[in-house]
Image (cartoon, grey):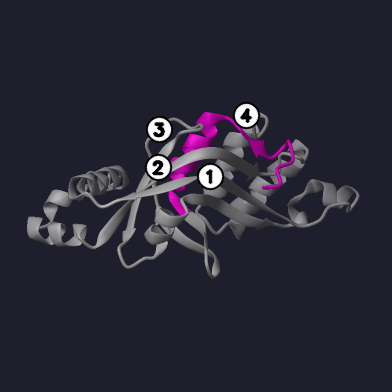
Amino acid sequence: MYRPSHFAVDDPEQIAAFLDACPLLHLVQTSAAGLVANPVPMLRLDPVGAGMRLLGHVARANGLWQLADTNPDVLAIASGPNQYISPNWYPAKAEHHRVVPTWNYLSCHLYGRLSTFDSRERLLDVLNRLTTHFEASQPRPWSVHDAPADYIDKLLGAIVGLELTVTRIECKFKLSQNHPKANQDGVLAGLAAGAETDHGALREWMRQVLQDGSGN
C-alpha cells in the first residue's frame, strides 16, 4: 500500500479500534484462475501485531477454504468510512484556488496465513464468540442457544471455520492530515452540512485522528 508518512498508521491501539469497528474483511487469494476475493466478517482475538489472530467462517460451498488448504497466503483488506471531499469546503479556495478534490478514507491491509477447521466443538465456539460480540449492542442480544439445537447442529455441518494469523500490517488513514487546520475544519463542516453518506462515521474518525495530531 502507498503510505505517505502523514497518512500511515502504526499505532496498535488505533489499528485495533479500526479493525473492531470495521470487521468485514475482504480476503484476497490466488487461484488457478487468478485472484479471487471474498468478504468475511472476522473477529480479532489478540492485540495488534505479528501473530495476531482473527476468527470467522464461510459456507462449505464457498471454495475459499479449499484454496486456503492448498495456498494459505492471503491478503485481508479492511475498509472503513470513505467520502469524496470537495475543494469548495476549503477556505484556501477563496484565497488562492490552489486546491483540488480528493477522497478521504481508512484502510488496513493484513497479510498472513489462513487455516481452516471443521471440528463441531470449535465451530460452535466461533459462532458463540461472533454472536456474543456483534449482538452486544442489541437491547435483547440473540444467542446461539436461542435456536433449536438440532438446527444449529445441521448448520455446523454446512460451514468451515477460518483462522487468519497475521504476519504484516499496513494501515492508512487519509483524513486531511496534510491540510492546515482551517481546511480540516472546512471538511468537517462540509460533511456536517449534509454531504456525508455514513451518519457521521468519517467525521468521528477525522476528529479522533486530527486531535491526536497525526495518523501515527
Q: Amino acid at mark 4?
A: Asp
Q: Quadrant of residue 179?
A: top right
Q: Which residue is mark 4?
A: 212
Q: Quadrant of residue 87?
A: bottom right
Nearer to the camera, 186 or 138: 138
Task: Specify the quadrant that holds the C terminus.
Answer: top right
Q: Give the secondary structure at mark 4.
A: helix
Spatial distance from mark 1 to mark 2, Cα to Cα?
10 Å
Q: Which residue is mark 3?
A: 46
Q: Position of residue 39 (x, y in %)?
A: 44, 59
Q: Which residue is mark 1?
A: 110
Q: Earlier in the sequence, mark 3 or mark 4?
A: 3
Quick one: label 3, few (<14), some, or many (20+) residues within 10 Å? few
Nearer to the camera, 86 or 117: 117
Determine the residue positioned at 44% across, 30% down. Answer: 47
Q: Are marks 1 and 2 in contact (CB under 8 Å)?
A: yes
Say whether residue 200 is visible: no
Q: Are marks 3 and 2 in contact (CB under 8 Å)?
A: no
Tell which tag, 1 or 4, sits nearer the viewer: 1
Q: Amino acid at mark 3?
A: Asp
Q: Give the secondary structure at mark 1.
A: strand
Q: Earlier in the sequence, mark 1 or mark 4?
A: 1
Q: Is residue 92 above or below residue 36?
A: above
Q: Earlier in the sequence, mark 1 or mark 3?
A: 3
